[in-house]
């Protein structure tokens, strides 16, 4: 046994034998931290025949049935892909005070009907956890443990044999086998490995809470996200009640779904009709409504724009909830292909409700909102715009146009500005105004 020293990058996990000010892999400064490792010089012989780890033909492998356990929180289940997979490890990150612990305590209470649930907190005492449980109206037999030592947690799991384990948070966990400080890269990696082993050996689904850095990434080495099965991010403004749960990695489902919650006095409440949260009212000047797709869910969203005479040589372009690069591209198309002069004006664009628009189907609505603000004209009341704008000024169909239009019909919209599409010719219940080019859509402004 020989002790070795190495330096590990806290951002990307890059390892080197000497310290450097800048990580050569991710180019982050002052992120290399010294860690100790124990290397064994003894040779380990292969025991493939004895432990059964031999190669098999893919057709002889029994795939088995993936057991999904619903949490009875529909928005949570949607993001997870239908429910919690037995033996999986789920990492949830988010800003402090965003509601991670509240959501997991509510989910733990709902999961009690499927088996024992152990809630472990390294940040709060048992009395503090009981106060939160009372606020969330949880009075059942949820098992609570206030502990930071991962070996003690593993022993308690072996004694209780729970079906679900919640660990809040991974940055407070420590292993007695490691001499590094709590919250260090080595401790986070070692405790996560131990929790993953607990999940696989006991077929126990493990939820892990992780703090985030000022850049919005989960604190600790990036390899932490590779060690777990699912990575979720809880997003939202602390001063606003709206919360979005988004999956960035899911080995058992899609990463395109989002869950929408509202923080209330009794905890996280599911938002069933999300479209009502992102629309303010009628079509005023500089406003347009569109329908985006978040996974399989259509959501109606309003975009707003404001133009002002620029006081500088270079006009400003500011976007909130929108891609600034995409905004500048659409501004160029609007001026070059539609003849709307905006190069001397500051442009401010916003997607209301705190949602972020990455859907190309919102291009037409955003462009019409900017054109309406420049021309002092607005869309007709009850009119919605859906479509992608190309560099030639052509309006192209977005993905799943039929689903988007059907959602508009359900919400009572009377007109829709859409590109020419064969799938929309037979739809009834709404007046479709098909356009070929951006100029044709701007002519509809009144």
Image (cartoon, rainbow, N blue to C red):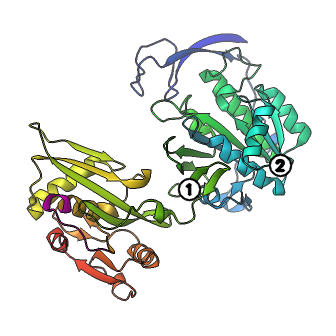
Q: Residue at x 19, y 68 (%)?
A: 394
User: Residue 63: image x %, image y %?
Assistant: 71, 60
Q: Which residue is mark 2?
A: 139
Q: Which residue is mark 1?
A: 259
Is most of the magenta stretch helix, strand or loop? loop
Residue 322 left/right relative to 140: left
Q: Is residue 27 above or below residue 445?
A: above
User: Residue 341: image x %, image y %?
Assistant: 8, 55
Q: In the drawing, what numbered circle is on residue 354? A: none
User: Residue 383: image x %, image y %?
Assistant: 31, 74
Magenta-drawn segment: 372-381
**Residue 54 visible within the image:** no
Q: In 3D space, how far apart are the residues under numbered discs 1 and 2 (Cα atoms)?
A: 25 Å
N-terminal of the two: label 1 or label 2? 2
Q: Is residue 185 above or below residue 170?
A: above
Asked if residue 439 lies in the magenta stretch, the reply is: no
Q: Is residue 16 above or below residue 107?
A: above
SS of the residue under disc 1: strand
């Amino acid at each position: 046994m020989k002790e070795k020293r190495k330096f590990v990058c806290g951002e990307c996990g890059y390892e080197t034998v000497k310290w450097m000010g800048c990580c050569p892999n991710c180019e982050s400064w002052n992120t290399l931290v010294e860690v100790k490792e124990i290397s064994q010089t003894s040779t380990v012989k292969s025991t493939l025949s004895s432990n059964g780890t031999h190669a098999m033909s893919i057709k002889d492998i029994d795939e088995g049935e993936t057991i999904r356990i619903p949490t009875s929180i529909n928005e949570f289940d949607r993001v997870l892909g239908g429910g919690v997979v037995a033996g999986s490890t789920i990492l949830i990150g988010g800003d402090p005070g965003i509601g991670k612990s509240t959501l997991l305590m509510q989910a733990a209470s709902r999961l009690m009907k499927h088996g024992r649930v152990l809630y472990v907190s390294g940040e709060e005492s048992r009395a503090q956890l009981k106060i939160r449980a009372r606020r969330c109206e949880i009075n059942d037999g949820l098992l609570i443990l206030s502990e930071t030592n991962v070996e003690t947690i593993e022993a308690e799991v072996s004694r209780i044999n729970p079906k679900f384990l919640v660990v809040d948070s991974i940055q407070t966990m420590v292993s007695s086998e490691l001499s590094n400080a709590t919250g260090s890269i080595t401790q986070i990696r070692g405790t996560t490995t131990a929790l993953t082993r607990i999940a696989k050996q006991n077929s126990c689904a493990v939820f892990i809470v992780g703090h985030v850095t000022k850049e919005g990434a989960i604190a600790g080495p990036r390899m932490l996200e590779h060690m777990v099965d699912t990575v979720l991010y809880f997003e939202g403004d602390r001063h606003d009640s709206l919360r979005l749960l988004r999956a960035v990695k899911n080995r058992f489902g899609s990463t395109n779904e989002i869950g929408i919650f509202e923080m209330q006095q009794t905890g996280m409440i599911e938002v069933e009709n999300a479209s009502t949260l992102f629309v303010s009212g009628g079509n005023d000047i500089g406003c347009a409504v569109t329908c985006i797709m978040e996974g399989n869910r259509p959501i109606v969203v309003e975009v707003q724009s404001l133009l002002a005479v620029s006081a500088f040589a270079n006009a400003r372009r500011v976007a909130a909830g929108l891609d600034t690069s995409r905004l500048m591209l659409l501004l160029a198309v609007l001026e070059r292909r539609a003849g709307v002069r905006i190069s001397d004006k500051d442009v401010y664009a916003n997607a209301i409700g705190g949602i972020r628009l990455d859907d190309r189907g919102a291009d037409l609505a955003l462009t019409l909102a900017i054109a309406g603000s420049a021309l002092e004209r607005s869309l007709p009341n009850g009119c919605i715009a859906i479509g992608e704008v190309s560099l030639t000024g052509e309006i192209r169909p977005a993905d799943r146009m039929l689903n988007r239009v059907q959602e508009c019909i359900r919400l009572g919209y009377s007109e829709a500005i859409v590109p020419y599409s064969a799938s929309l010719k037979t739809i009834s219940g709404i007046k479709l105004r098909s356009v070929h080019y951006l100029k044709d859509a701007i002519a509809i402004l009144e």
